[in-house]
Amino acid sequence: MPGTLATFYFEGTGGFVLTRHVPYLIDPRTPLLQTLDVRRGPPKKSHLKLAEIHDHDVIATWPHYEIDRSHWEDGRWPAVVASVLDFQLSYSGTATAKVSKYLQLLRDAGRDVPARNPPDPQWLVPPYWAVDSARDPWWALTRQAVQIAVAAHGGRVTPILTLRNDVPIFMFAELIEQMPDGITDVFCWSSNWQEANATETDIRNWVGVIETASARGVRVRNLYGGYLSVLLTSKGLSGLNHGVGYSEARDYRRLSATGAPPTRYYVPALREFMTVPTAQPVIDHLPAEWACPCPVCQTVVAADGRPRIGGLNPEALKKHFLFARAAEFQRVDASLEDELDDLELVGKWVEENSRPFLPAADGSRLRGWARILRTL
């Protein structure tokens, strides 16, 4: 749960999350407060609420001045860390004003939901900054925050490690090697890294990071990822964070630009999202046997066996994606080789049957991933 929502919509997010009794964490999104290398507009009210759980002194100056790193290096950092963690620890006991309302909404929808004590976050995330290496002064603050958190809360601490834009993926390994003992899980966020543009070096570096972490008994999750990250679970990646309301990539410099991804259709055969108008001619061009078989798409399937997705509303499009993503995990778990065979089959067909709306590059991407993963 983004810290901006957890703070600004404190009661609403509390009611929504705490009634579901599912594992959750609160991302403090500290890079929103970081001195940036691009200009941004004035902070929103939700940004100021997020700043409050870090340091109240920020509120008086941030609307007028950028927050320099020296602000956090003047001795206040341990108190900032404690404040961020205290907010997470107290959330299940304080964000409860609308729990009864949300329980009733679930019951009205036919869900049998017993009244239970709201759950604490499964993971505690200390404040963190985007860095370019283990020599970055911002990393010294991040690492200190992890050390403070582990000393107080042990194995519940799961750091978010964030690399600035265009920093090589292998740098995560350097950061993980500096993690204090007691860390068993980390989230890795490569800012604005687009999986569709992944190079062979990127993929090999991810595997190297996973192996470095494994040697230390640490599991790696990709904070923002898509189908390529699903494939990498076969190489030891512990998971990825890509919900229906999250994009596949995120620029740490653009945290102030909020909102869910646009309405899109996930084309299972191509393992990518497209806008609905763009996706329909692709679906009509691909072999009918590659059309999505999920229950959602079957409600709009035509006589030729292909869905007419213009009839799907945003909720249906999200459900379709969840069915498709679950199927990808199942296939990769069952047989990576079979999945790579399918990538090569689809990729070759696309290259040989490309159209302006379905470029050969889409096929080359799939075949390239298959080729690389077979060598790892």
Image (spheres, rainbow, N blue to C red):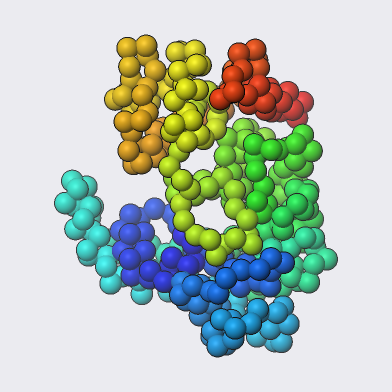
Task: Tell me if 147 is positioned left or right of 14 in this view.
Answer: right
Figure check: 41 above or below 184 = below
Q: Nearer the viewer, residue 255 or 240?
A: 255
Location of residue 360 (image quadrant) = top right
Task: Tell me if 8 is positioned left or right of 209 in this view.
Answer: left
Q: Nearer the viewer, residue 314 or 103?
A: 314
From where the camera sits, is residue 237 visible? yes
- Furthest-front residue in view? 356
Figure check: 149 above or below 236 = below
Q: Nearer the viewer, residue 118 or 87?
A: 87
Q: Report the quarter where the C terminus lies.
A: top right
Residue at (55% x, 32% y) in the render: 272
**Can you give x and y, in whole percent of width and height, for residue 40 in the image?**
61, 68
Residue at (46% x, 45% y) in the render: 262
- Furthest-right residue in view? 135
Task: Tell me if 260 is positioned left or right of 210 in this view.
Answer: left
Location of residue 152 (image quadrant) = bottom right
Residue at (31% x, 24% y) in the render: 300
**Can you give x and y, in whole percent of width and height, for residue 85 in the image?**
53, 73
Figure check: 109 above or below 43 = above
Residue at (46% x, 60% y) in the render: 1
From where the camera sits, is residue 161 visible? no
**Can you give x and y, in whole percent of width and height, for residue 31 in the image?**
62, 67
Instruction: Count every numbered label the image shows and give the total.
Output: 0
Figure check: 62 above or below 9 = below
**Can you give x and y, in whole percent of width and height, for residue 73 in the image?**
72, 82
